[in-house]
Image (cartoon, rainbow, N blue to C red):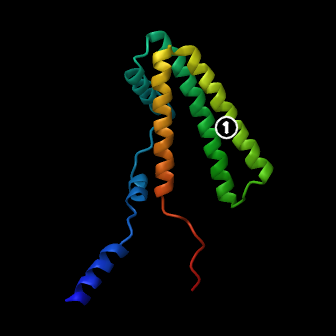
Amino acid sequence: MMTVLILVGSIGFSQEKHEPRHKRENRVELTAEQRNDLRLKQMTLKLDLTAAQQKEMAKIIADQETRRAEAMSKMKEARDKKTKPTADEVYAMKSKRLDAQIENRAKMKKILNEEQFAKWEKMDSHRKAQFRKGMHDRPKKGPEPQD
């Protein structure tokens, strides 16, 4: 009886869960314009943006999407070439990303009122925490097993 319980229990725990990767593969890719539009609408709902604020926010979102697309293509290119960035390249990328975040924060502060800005900061920190949590839960890529 004990052997059966151990066997059933070990089989249940040995099953790996690859659900997130599977969901990602079946996901439909939206165009940049569609993503921008949806993001603007979400922000409008959550922050109660005025028409003037929506116009300014649309510009910021489009700029962010352009930067994101450039970064993704560079990462894909490096991954395809199987090259690792040097320490100086990593520093330059991180510095550029932080500069963009500082610039984005300043723009948001100009566009939003104090209450909206406080809500936006809370949303942004929550989004970053969710991203970190997701990165932490991802399966680790290790060296390939030797036969």
> Relative to 68, is 112 on the left or the right?
left
In the image, residue 28 sits, relative to residue 104, either above or below, namely below
Q: Is residue 89 visible?
A: yes
Residue that appears at 48% across and 63% down: 139
Q: Quadrant of residue 119?
A: top left
Give whichever of 49, 38 is nearer the camera: 49
Q: Nearer the viewer, residue 106 or 76?
A: 106
Secondary-structure class at tag 1: helix
Image spot of residue 19 (x, y percent): 37, 59
Residue that label 1 marks: 97
17 left or right of 82?
left
Q: Quadrant of the C terminus?
A: bottom right
122 lies left or right of 110: left
In the picture, residue 97 is in which quadrant? top right
Can you name the residue that lies furthest to the right here?
A: 88
Residue occupying the far front of the picture = 2
Residue 31 visible somewhere in the drawing? no
The quadrant of the image that shows the N terminus is: bottom left
Q: Position of residue 101 (x, y in %)?
A: 63, 31
Q: How many marks?
A: 1
Residue shown at 49% from the left, 45% from the top: 131
Which residue lies at the image location 48% right of the left edge and 23% below the top edge?
A: 118
Tell me if residue 124 comes above or below residue 74 in the rendering: above
Q: Of the residues shown, which amino acid type is indicated by label 1?
A: Arg
